[in-house]
Amino acid sequence: MQTTTDTLTLTGPLDPAALRRAAGPLTVTVDAAARARLDRGRRLFRTLRDGHDGDGQRQIYGATTGFGALVGYAGRADEADQCDNTLAHLGAGQGPDLPRDVVRAALLVRARSLAQGLSGVSADVVERLADMFATTFTPAVPRYGSVGASGDLIPLAYAAQALRGRGHAYVDGHRMPAADALTAAGLRPLALDGRDALALVNGTSVTTAALALAHDTVRTALRTLTELTCLLADLLGCDPGFLDAGLLTAHGHPGAADIGARMRTLLAGTAPSGTRPLQEPYSIRCSPQLLGAAQDALGYVDAVVAADLAGVSDNPLFIPEGGPESAGAGRAVHGGNFFGQPAAFAADLLASVTAQLGNLAERQLDLLVDPARNGGLPPMLATEPGAQHGLQGVQLATTAFVAEIRRNATPAAMQSLPTNLHNQDVVPFGTQGALRAHDMAGLLDLLCGSLALGLRQAVHVGARRPTAPRCAEILDTLIAAIDPVDPDRPLDEDVRTAARLLATPATP
């Protein structure tokens, strides 16, 4: 079995790069500060639940009560029984398993939230979660069943059950009964009481993880499309006047000015051919305005992802008071920190950005394969049109990718549908939005790869070499990894290779 090669601590906020690292074996540590917070939170939970603070036993949701709409009824007296009661009724998910990188990222987000010590869980739960990351163990979690309102209850319940040895899980990519997977990974089944079980499921960790991973991919695609747009303009011999600094400053939008500056750097040294029309099509001429607006919009998503990765999503929370000398003092607060509305809004915005970036990539490839607009290159960039078909199949596929992205771009955050006997009478559907954004981001990545492949092929069939040194470097990277399409061959792997080549980590 694959072993860990990386280290991360649960003290401090996470970032998307950490979530990416969690896809493979990762050493996650619970340091002394986190352990102290967990122990204090656990004592406070027990003190309040049992009435040891002198005010008598309190009603604490999920510990002394039923769940959801059944909060007005008593829960089960036995703690282990209450755990079973929590998780069993949530075993109602359906559909294919979530991507394993999303599941492991979600559990890292959950572990970090619990490690803040406000959920009243035992330190052993967090330490055992940390142990999981040193292996390839990944719970099998069905995609459908969460509304992102009271956290991601159903998907996280499947994850918790797998950690207990129930249901199914993956080890080294192989799906098997969870009990066998734990054994193969060298892990022991997790023992939980009712508070531990509820805290594991009562947060938006799946939503947060999927949104963060999707956002990271779209950020990278924005950078890639900025580079590919410059390469396209150079190959065609476009005049870079559409990037004029005074023009973009007058526009008044910081993203457009910033993207324009990046593009001027990439196109430094370019020599216009003098044969292009006075004004290029919008997919070139308006690219700094489009890409800049995308950058500005992603700034909002940046803030939501950062807040969700640094925050605590759970209910109830156990808020300590005073200093170390009052270690048992505090209060249980029942509220809505599991309500995923911020992520839902951000996911919808991310979907809109993804769709328009996808439109841009598809339109640029369409321009590149059209002899009426590509400066006289052969149709479909075929070396011998008719006998060869060049990028025809790839261009068809990009149309399908864009159609799929558009179909999924319908906003989710305002599709509220009451459930749970109207206890959850408004729901954000952030989970649907975030998982959909994750799917769309993957398609955008393929659109970038398709455009890159087209640009590599354009030079093979007669386009000029780039005259800007930075653009020449981008092209040479593609040429070194991808053979020209001559003769025809399947290009699916080439598209993925091109996408990987250009998917360098993006920075906000």
Image (spheres, helix red, strand yellow):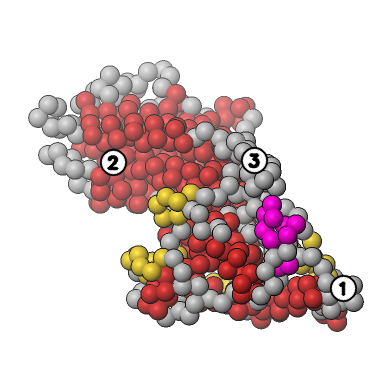
Local secondary structure at mark 3:
loop
| Residue numbers of the magenta segment | 63-73
What x and y, as percent, mark residue 304?
64, 49
- Relative depth, front residue between 205 and 18: 205
Query: Which residue is outermost to the right?
Result: 54
- Relative depth, front residue between 245 and 52: 52
Local secondary structure at mark 1:
loop
**What residue did someone put label 1 on?**
56
Q: On screen, 298 above or below 96?
A: above
Q: Is residue 455 visible?
A: no
Which is nearer the N-term, disc 1 or disc 2? Answer: 1
Which is nearer the N-term, disc 2 or disc 3? Answer: 3
Local secondary structure at mark 2:
helix
User: Quarter of the image holding residue 4?
Assistant: bottom left
Prevailing secondary structure class for the magenta stretch in the rendered image = loop
Residue 31 located left or right of residue 227 = right
**What residue did someone put label 2 on?**
453
Q: Are marks 2 and 3 in contact (CB under 8 Å)?
A: no
The N terminus sits in image quarter: bottom left
Classify mark 1: residues with Cα within 10 Å, few (<14), some (14-19) or many (20+).
few
Residue 342 located left or right of residue 368 = right
**Distance Cα–Cα, label 3 vs label 1:** 35 Å
What x and y, as percent, mark residue 234?
35, 34
- Residue type, mark 3 in image: Pro
**What residue did someone put label 3 on?**
418
- Residue type, mark 2 in image: Leu
x 70%, y 47%: residue = 423
x 28%, y 31%: residue = 396
- Residue type, mark 1 in image: Gly
Q: Is residue 1 visible?
A: yes
